Image (cartoon, grey):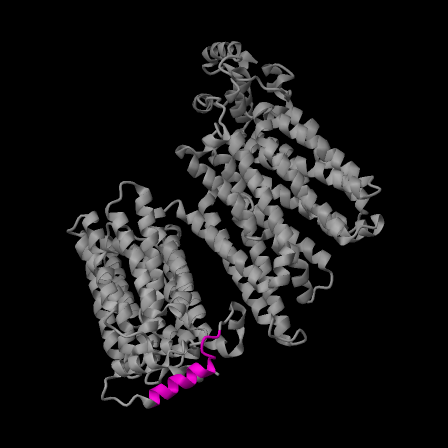
Amino acid sequence: MNGGGSRRGGASCADESGSDQDGGSGGGLRKPLLNTGSWYRMGSRSSLAASSMAAIRESHVSAFLCTLIVALGPIQFGFTSGFSSPTQDAIIRDLKLSISEFSAFGSLSNVGAMVGAIASGQMAEYIGRKGSLIIAAVPNIIGWLAISFAKDASFLYMGRLLEGFGVGVISYTVPVYIAEISHQNTRGALGSVNQLSVTIGILLAYLLGMFVPWRLLAVIGSIPCTLLIPGLFFIPESPRWLAKMKMMDDFEASLQVLRGFETDITAERAVASANKRTTVRFKELNQKKYRTPLLIGTGLLVLQNLSGINGILFYASRIFRDAGFTNSDLATCALGAIQVLATGVTTWLLDRAGRRILLIISTAGMTLSLLAVSVVFFLEGNISHDSHSFYILSMISLVALVAYIITFSFGMGAIPWVMMSEILPVSIKSLGGSFATLANMLTSWAITMTANLLLSWSAGGTFLSYMIVSAFTLVFVIFWFSVFGSLSNVGAMVGAIASGQMAEYIGRKGSLMIAAIPNIIGWLAISFAKDSSFLYMGRLLEGFGVGVISYTVPVYIAEISPQNMRGALGSVNQLSVTVGILLAYLLGMFVPWRLLAVIGILPCTVLIPGLFFIPESPRWLAKMNMMDDFETSLQVLRGFETDISAEVNDIKRAVASANKRTTIRFQELNQKKYRTPLILGIGLLVLQQLSGINGILFYAGSIFKAAGLTNSDLATCALGAIQVLATGVTTWLLDRAGRRILLIISSAGMTLSLLAVAVVFFLKDSISQDSHMYYTLSMISLVALVAFVIAFSFGMGAIPWIIMSEILPVSIKSLAGSFATLANWLTSFGITMTANLMLSWSAGGTFVSYMVVSAFTLVFVILWVPETKGRTLEEIQWSFR
């Protein structure tokens, strides 16, 4: 094989490899413990050329066949995962097991897999990828035979442990092997075959389990690994592992076989052979150069299971029963088939669309699906099981469950394993890969074992917790590609969660003081930053403060304002936001960034002493039963010559009906009297961001340039000034025209403006950029963009915050207000981070999607949003009872 491997500059490499092998025992390096044969060693190069292997000389075909053979391992993995579901009743009956004994049987595969995961990296390092798979196959076969011939629980347990050990090794080794043999253009598709095979194994276990006795099913379970062992002798070893082991002749032969004998492998050979074989100890993984790949590789595999996939599948049969499917086994098989199809689509898309966009779509879809399931379960808690509404909600949960499975399979099922095998450097792949696989198996076991406990506590709460993990995964995926800019949103979401309880227990003024301190520290950290860690810390602290402020300020203003001025004063909140944006734009054109960060401190530095000169919210004081302070505060706000007795009585009556300091739990928000204000308050804040305002402003610079405005910074400042002016007009109009009419005008104007921008972008795709028509269309898009910003500022910018602060009853304002603010920031983050991806896909399509949301907002306002102008907060809240 020396001649075959050295066909393209191979002679020098052969000499080099010979010297490497002669000295292979030096330098503290060990030779591989096992080196399995391959079909390409069974004959000469000339005989191979005339053989049937001529058909697989193209790189993608040869690697594809290798992938199909090692995919028998993941099929075994899936079969192990799916075996216990259809066999539970039969095994319990035949072996007279208790439920707890069978549960132990089911969980032991995870225990064995954790042991296998610990061993997998070092096994793959010292005996090769193929050797590891052979060793993993043997206990799998023995394990299945032990289960098949089991006479009591001990045989079941031993077999399940052995199976699990093999699965643990397979789950690391297969994706690594596929990544190392694949060409870069097909690595994603071939890598996702790993997860596709797992889903096929699960589906086979479900299907066969409906017709085959459990002992025969266990025998069938041994078939994949029985075929895998001989199959491994007909495929090459990983060329990268061979190069790392200094087996240079075998390395070149393996790579040439995989790429085809007519392919020039010089460049790929040079890269692969450059890898040095070094031993890395566990504590050395903490080196800076390894942190990011370890965090991403391990993080994705942990988040894959923390999103609750095993808990969801565990609970699927009950959802099917509630939806009227009496044959839950058949429904589970259908779910398995959906997984296979969705993973197959991912396999086709992965090298076309890319890993990141599929992960974003997958995690976003999982978040929305889990939110829907969670809301349904909270609603079902208050509805009779015999009612038509209960059936409708069950159908909704079924659709949401299927949507979750599809979106999980669309990215988070396959891609974390692909990423782990791609992203870990070769020097730490064995140790880091073992750690990542162990973390995956450990979280899988934890989720499986806690699912029943969590679901018995609160089904809605369980799905909500999984939804939060999925939302965090979405943040995690985007985070590493846009860290600094996104951290303020992350901090704001944390601040939003805390804001309601802070404002409840330490007051509106106290919350604002606490929010100001991290803002000041954050700006100082940014100003004096010496590296990115200071920037990140500063941005997080700033974001936390902003999250608290964004809830507390509109609530405070609404609670201190007289009913005939509440709209105007409330809109000062959004007006101040636009003034702050404009100041940042203007000063940023002339001031160095460190000085600009110092200037950013000034508002909060002035805020803290200013708070000592204003009264606390009278409504909060009344709720806290501080009645003397309440009346004093209200009298100061209204003036000492004003009779406040009527307003005092209204507030006291509202507070009394809210039971003063009654603590509302999250599930109690589902009470009928709270639903409408919650839907309106949260709905408007979410639709405000879904209309795409952040995406539009993000793309404004490009539109300005296309319209011939070369100074895009100046144009952006002009746009900021337009926002300030339009919001100022809203401030003047709010208590004259009312909230509802301004929201209708605003959302209608946004819809028409976005329609114009979308049409322009679709037309520009077919017009030369040098033509006069292209310039005319660019000017139209510029005018439409300005019209959108004016329309947004005219209503949807300020009024959702005012409505939220007016409409939420005092008894739930802290909890519901936090949730509404969090929803707004989460949506803002999602729109901002996906804008660039969507616009690169289709600018016209992106603006159409924003237009559809704006049109829906128009309908939402017309049908459901009431007028609150001229009514006291107590009157507004009483109207929903």
Vertically, is 757 above or below 808?
Answer: above
* Residues in magenta, as a range: 646-662
Instruction: Tell me where residue 635 appears, x and y as whole percent.
Output: 27, 83
658 or 875, which lies in front? 658
758 or 199, which lies in front? 199
Which part of the image, by quadrant, shows the N terminus?
Answer: top right
On whether residue 327 falls in the magenta region, the answer is: no
On whether residue 652 falls in the magenta region, the answer is: yes
- Residue placed at 65% from the left, 25% from the top? 234
- Residue placed at 78% from the left, 44% from the top? 217
Dominant SS type (magenta): helix
Query: In this view, which residue lies farthest toward the left?
Result: 590
Q: Is residue 401 left or right of residue 270?
A: right
Q: Is residue 88 left or right of residue 519?
A: right
Locate residue 372: give its quadrant: bottom right
Instruction: Tell me where residue 160 appears, x and y as whole percent.
Output: 72, 40
- Residue placed at 76% from the left, 49% from the top? 101
Instruction: Tell me where residue 519 appears, x and y as whole percent.
Output: 29, 56
Q: How many marks?
A: 0
Can residue 107 be seen in this snapshot? yes
Q: Is residue 666 left or right of residue 694?
A: right
Vertically, is 750 above or below 179?
Answer: below
Instruction: Tell me where residue 403 appears, x and y as whole percent.
Output: 56, 58
Can residue 61 be seen in this snapshot? no
85 or 569, which lies in front? 569
- Residue placed at 26% from the left, 71% from the top? 572
